Amino acid sequence: MHDPDHRPLRYDAAERFAPNLVASGAWRPGDPLGQRRLMTVTDGRPFALEAGGRLEEITLAYETWGELNADGSNGVLVCHALTGDSHAAGPISPGHVGDGWWDEFIGPQKAIDTDRWFVVCANVLGGCQGSTGPSSDVPGEDRPYAARFPQVTIRDMVRTQRRLADRLGVGKWLAVVGGSLGGMQVLEWGVMFGDRVRLLMPLATCAAASPQQIAWSAVERLAIVNDPLFNNGDYYDAPAGKGPWAGLALAREISQITYRTSVVFDQRFGRQHVDQRNELEPWGRYQVESYLDHHGQKLVRRFDANTFLVLSKAMDLHDIGRGRGGIDAAFSRLSSPVFTASINSDLLYPPYQQAAIRDGVVSAGGCCEYHIVDSPQGHDGFLLESSLLGPLIHDAIAETEASA
């Protein structure tokens, strides 16, 4: 006899998500600007990319806090991680779907003190929150690049940031700071434009992506391209619910597992179910599954699947030694002191990678201050542990400023 209350032994992703998830959460012209500003950093000439492609025009979205002093010496560049953007500080507002991703660190009397320093954060080249990326329209065409957007690298991102610095009047950054993908940018700033930085602060990052990091990234990208609604990247005209939201959400759920730790999951969720009545059903959900779904939906509403592919691959390509005779030779190019920090429970960018940065800098004759932050938060600790990491960052920048 058919049981009308019996759920089929299949998985329907739509049952776990809101039915109106957008095809892309990218910022588009006509959307509220919020606190972001837009600047074209090309001068009417194509921008040649490291991988061989080129872009005819590049716009960067950026935000600033504080005031640049008369001699332009108090600038601090903050570099964001994979799914971050220029909104590093400030509240939710039209144009910004969430609080600043480093809001506890940046502001008056905070670790990166905007009463004292001029703070800049730019959405990276390839991003989707105002900077030129896959969701941007091709110049002269009324359609996005989509899958036609060329692969960019960390070095390409830093070259565009240097142009932004020129236009903002920052001849030399007091400090460049960032974690994860942001830390990769910091290291490239030091190797490529060491004369433009007084202090390098790469956090929870590496000198070159490891095989395990590449493996996680590859699986996340496969989750996106195997979504039947990905449509080879041409989904921007798709109505709500008909874009590759499931693939992007799954990619985020995979990454979220790598960002946290079993300690956090045990403490927050244990083995609790969302609905104890469905505990023994095939797709009855645990609380930890609901948590992952929540983060997947949040990302879909503010990010873009093609952008995830481009930036994730850029992280895999990260290797400061590529074309420079190896990592040790690259470290020998650094002329600025380095401050690096680890989260002791970080499973994705383990402390040995930041220790290797320290060892490489010191072996090359440079100066490196290294700290280990004791936190159960995993990789996300560099975003969450403002009370532990913030004072270290503040003091390092202040000491650099005082040493002028």
Image (cartoon, rainbow, N blue to C red):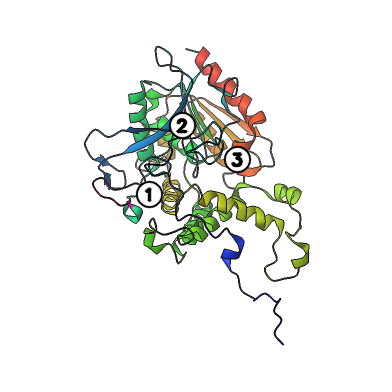
In screen coordinates, is 333 left or right of 270? left
Amino acid residing under circle 1: Ser
Q: Principal SS element in the magenta part?
A: loop
Return the x and y of residue 315 as percentages of the image width and height: 45, 46
Instruction: Mark 2 vs mark 1: give the one in front.
Output: 2
Magenta segment includes 246: no
- The first of marks 3 and 2 along the sequence is 2
Secondary structure under tag 2 reads loop
Q: Residue at x 44, y 61 (%)?
A: 225
**Label 2, on which residue?**
35
Mark 3 neighbour class, 10 Å CA radius: few under 14, some 14 to 19, many 20 or more: many
> In the image, which disc is placed on residue 135?
1
**Label 3, on which residue?**
351
Q: Quadrant of residue 43?
A: top left
Magenta segment includes 139: yes
Amino acid residing under circle 3: Pro
Amino acid residing under circle 2: Gln
Return the x and y of residue 321 as percentages of the image width and height: 40, 40
